[in-house]
Image: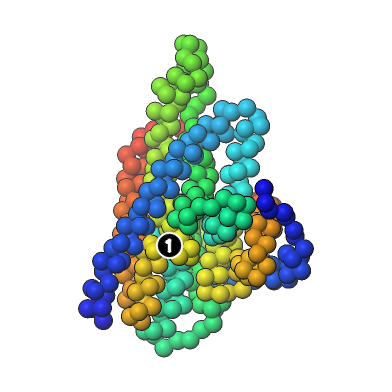
Amino acid sequence: MGYALNFNLIWRHFDKLWGGLLLSLELAVISIAIGIVIGLVLAVWYVSAGRIVRTIIAAYVEFIRNVPLILLVYLVFYGLPTVVDIAYSAPTSFVVTLSLYSGAYLVEVFRSGLEAVPRGQLDAGKAIGLTPWQRLLNVRLPTMLRITLPALSNTFISLFKDTSIASVISVPELTYGAQWINFNTFRIVEVYLVVTAMYLVTGYILLFALRLVERRFRAAR
Amino acid sequence: MLTQIAYALPFLAQGFALTLWVSLLVVVFSLIAGVIMGVGLVYGPIPLQWAVRIFSDTIRGIPILVLIFFVYYGLPAVGLHLPSFWAAVLALTLFKTAQVVEYLRGAVGSIPRGQSEAAMAIGLTFRQRLAYVIFPQAFRRFLPPWINGVTDAVKGSALVSLLGITDLMQAINQVIGRTYEAMPLYVLGALIYFAVNYALSLASRRLERRFSFIRE
């Protein structure tokens, strides 16, 4: 085999990968934070709304879920500014896309979570004289969040992996760093081995940490 | 604007055909590889189980894009020269195979142990047990998520545009490069992908409802 592994050039440019990893995490965190807000608002609205609103929310969810993320990224970055008078940097545009994307997945998660809250709890809330608003805030949402926590952490980990798509609009995250080293040093196998390890280790650390959080807040059965 | 897009339609149709072709190849190859590896994961000897587990967890732990670049740029470096089309199909197949392995494990795992033991008791061989007892039952659990997962192959195939393969995504970008009609073309592309994938997820949901009479 005519290929000798040599990691020296990877370590020399490791700052590109490390900085990229931090940016990937940052993009994922900001996007899921906005996505949670979108998901919560739309899910609560959905369960109490009439048919028209439900159809619109379902259309948003189905549209996002059935279109490739890379197309959505192009659409928001290259397409939208041609019809609406907005200008944003590539990272901002990507956060907008990934937020809308995670929002669509989380509407589904939260909606089924809301339906899984036992009726007895809501009746109990009513019985002790809580207003509808208090029942939502103090009974329904906390229980729903506990139920949906595992799905929420899975969504976050898959969003972290989806940040690699940001490289197609030159956002300098981890995959972009890998591409840069690939094209500038030709240490192809080495850089992708290192980047694979970085994605895996980070993913599993996140998984482990989130499982701990889940255990702490697990819904009582 | 409309005449320009109409002029580009045959070209987009070619790209769409390539998207479907890539997806079809990936779905077929991954089904074969995934079912074999899945059976290895559930019934194989411990070292084989470990190998499949590590394969599946590694593939599912990294972004598809990284997998595609790794295969596309990495294989020539170690002396394997695949045309970019087949490198893309190989990478997407690896990704999809890991999914099929998990669907199969879930489906087979949901069949009660007693079924296997009863089959053993009446003297069926391992192959007969799989063919006559386990698979016919597991099939109903396997099919709905698998069909739904085909949408992942179609969506994932859009990434092959980054290797210069003229699929639907790449065709759209090239037409935009000439006409500067970014928004209408991206929306058109989104609607095409949506039509395919939404049909698949509807089929999956319908099957799931049809098979829902089976209880735990």
Instruction: Determine which quarter of the picture holds residue B138.
Output: top left
Task: Tell how many labels.
Answer: 1
Question: Most extreme residue toward the bottom, as rendered?
Answer: A85
Residue B99's spot in the image, x, y percent? 50, 45
The answer, for residue A180, to whether it is visible in the render is yes
Question: On screen, B68 above or below A170?
Answer: above
* Other residues around mark 1 within 10 Å, as few (<14) / some (14–19) / many (≥20): some
**Residue occupying image coordinates x 39% and y 35%:** B140
Residue underneath mark 1: B165
Q: Is residue A108 left or right of residue B52?
A: left
Residue B72 locus on image (x, y percent): 54, 57
* In the image, residue B19 above or below residue B7: above
Q: Position of residue A221 (x, y in %)?
A: 58, 44
* Left or right: where B16 falls relative to A117: left
Outermost residue toward the front?
A2
Viewer-proximal residue among A135 and B105: B105
In this rendering, position of residue B120 left or right of residue B146: right
Q: Note whether residue B118 is visible.
A: no
